[in-house]
Image: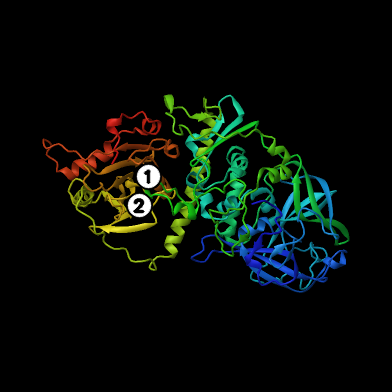
Amino acid sequence: MRLPLDESLEHRSLSKLEGLWKVVHLGNLITAVAPEKTPRLVIYFRKLINQDNPISPDDFETQGSAVAIRVPAAELMRLPLNTVISNSRIVKNPCLPLPSEEIATLDVDIGESKFRLIDRYAQFHETDNYVIPYNDGRSPSHDSDGGKTYYVAIEYNGDPFGIIIPCAEVFRFFYCTSSRMLYTILSDKVLDPDRFIIDPARSGTVEGDSKVASVWLRQWMLNSDRRHIARLFFTPGAFEEAKNIFLRASGYIDGGAFKHALIALPPCHGQMSLKCIFKKFVSNGRERIFVTRLICATNWTIPFDEIHYGRDNDGSKVAKDDERDNLPDDTRQQRPNVLVEGAEINVLEDTSADNSIDPVELNDVEFEARFPELDKIYSPKIEKTDQKTKNNKRKNQLLLADGSLVEGSSAEHEGLVNTILSAMEQATAIKQEQREADDGQSTPINELDVKQSKLHGTIDHLEKARVHRSYAGRLDIKYLPVLDELGLIKGKLVNILPETLSGKRRAFLYLDREQTVRRPVLVASLSVNGRMRYIVEFMHRYKQADTGSLLLWHPDEIPMGELLLNYAILQCMRNNAVNLKEGVILMNYCGKSLKHTHSKRKPEPEYVQFITKIFTAKNEMDKWISGEIDESEEQDI
């Protein structure tokens, strides 16, 4: 779909607005309510004075009370301030000024000391006048449910409030390269970037040439996001700024002071030329500029000459629903995650979710218009030939568009991994908070109806060792909830693998060939004398030989985050085997496969030998991740 204007595109969310209306205020976010999974945004509209043929500045003034509508958040991409709509369709190109507006390029300094965050009702201390004049009826009242909004005030011509830009407009212009990117930043997906945004095993900058980057997109992302993903992960502080948009809106930082607010700060700090549409206003005796729409960042760029990109799915055309119905079951492809190039859509449904068939995406022409310098960066696509390349000599290797393998910067790669780990740690803390808040209100967890297995034996070993004289009073065992769905085996908590991975049903996820019984995974922490290690054990598939187990631990044998354990399970699912090949997020942790063997010659019972084996295991994580462990040691089950 083409942005920013497609007059034929109907916004179903605006169906109750009859006649000519104008966007007059961008309010706060509304938390998703089931079955919706993504937030809505409150946008205020007011009716135009001239409903027949508005031409003059006065014709585009508004009347009556503002009407608040909760629209799917992605519609912000098409509905910036002063956008005029008629019968659910845009009728004036938002990239062109209304008669009451001006358009010009402003040279601004967005250094950290040059801008500040203000809310809609900020006042000057000396006079109590509003920084932004308040118009009754046009602006929502101070106590309105949806009107909470913030602005970036930039120093201009010596005036600390010389230029004012709504934070929602900063977000729309700088961060919304697609509805996918918008919903990723506004959801907890932004705290799990390895799963939803970027593959760290195949992304980085080239050793000795930091201006060449390779970005491997996860299936969730769109091609149009690639330059901004490179910016987020390879320029200092950028991902933190994007992450904080979600954390503020969710109430997880600043003591919850900004909960539900859409606050985005400029993604660069320094001189910038901004082409924008604005209105001049006077407050506290000074003329100031209020930006309604940002049009072009004429000189904004990022420090790269080349950004090569590939993806988990190659973005080629895949069958739509009507085509899939005619395909044999074994050749049906998953629901498409990338819009077919050149496809047109006619309706934006009033549903707060990112429809994977019809995502709102900036095409190359609009991207060039918005970010001309960014668009000049050479960005070829890596054809999907051999995605997984052996990590030779345990060094990060990057695939480029010409098919060559180059050595990646180890420092940059470590920085990328640490950025992802930091996000995962925050997600773990948030989940723990939610779990404590929901304590006692959760759905009952039931005993699973599965066949006897060695996983049952592992639980027996753990429970017997807990009370044996060798470990009684010293061995602490906790059965951990890591995945979304849980069950019980022998009364102990186990995790249940999902039905699909990236939209595909895989044999690895099920116990039976018919794929009706999903596979349980036991995750347990074991602590002896302050030393903590973790066992992650996959129940063996029916008619298979053995249960597959991982041992994981922190180098200092202190607790590991829940999402790291989740990541280890995810990596096994990606590999269709109980091994951690290319699991680079764990490269600074310790791990080893665990064999269920014991010696009959030793006097200790099997279950005591089992615990001893766990705490004497030697680290093989680096060999594991690099793929250097012998095939005989891999557990493909």
The colour scheme used to paint the residues is rainbow
Q: Which of 190 and 36 is in front in this view?
A: 36
Q: Sequence order check: which comes first, mark 2 or mark 1?
A: 2
Near mark 2 (Cα within 10 A), the count class, few <14, some 14-19 or many ≥20, is many
| Residue for badge 2 | 497
Q: Please report contact status of discs 2 and 1: CB closer than 8 Å, yes or no.
A: yes
Q: Is 417 drawn above or below residue 173 in the view shown?
A: above
What quarter of the picture does the C terminus occupy?
top left
Could one spot residue 205 in this view of the protein? yes
- Looking at the image, residue 108 sits to the left or right of residue 524; the answer is right
Which numbered dot is residue 10?
none
Q: Position of residue 391 (x, y in %)?
A: 43, 28
Q: What residue type is labelled 2?
A: Leu
Q: Is mark 1 on a helix, strand or loop?
A: helix
Q: Quadrant of residue 18?
A: bottom right
Q: In which quarter of the image is residue 168?
A: bottom right
Can you identify the residue that label 1 sits on? 573
Q: Is residue 440 above or below residue 358?
A: below
Percent of width and height locating residue 397: 49, 28
Q: Residue at x 42, y 61 (%)?
A: 435
Between residues 77 and 239, which one lies in front from this camera angle?
Answer: 77
158 displayed left or right of 8: right
Q: How many marks?
A: 2
User: Residue 425 placed where, x, y %?
Assistant: 47, 48
Q: Give neighbour class at mark 1: few <14, some 14-19, many 20+ (Cα, 10 Å).
A: many
Residue in front for this viewpoint, 575 or 466: 575
Taking the image as shown, residue 376 lies to the left or right of residue 321, namely right
Q: Residue 56 occupies which quadrant of the picture?
A: bottom right
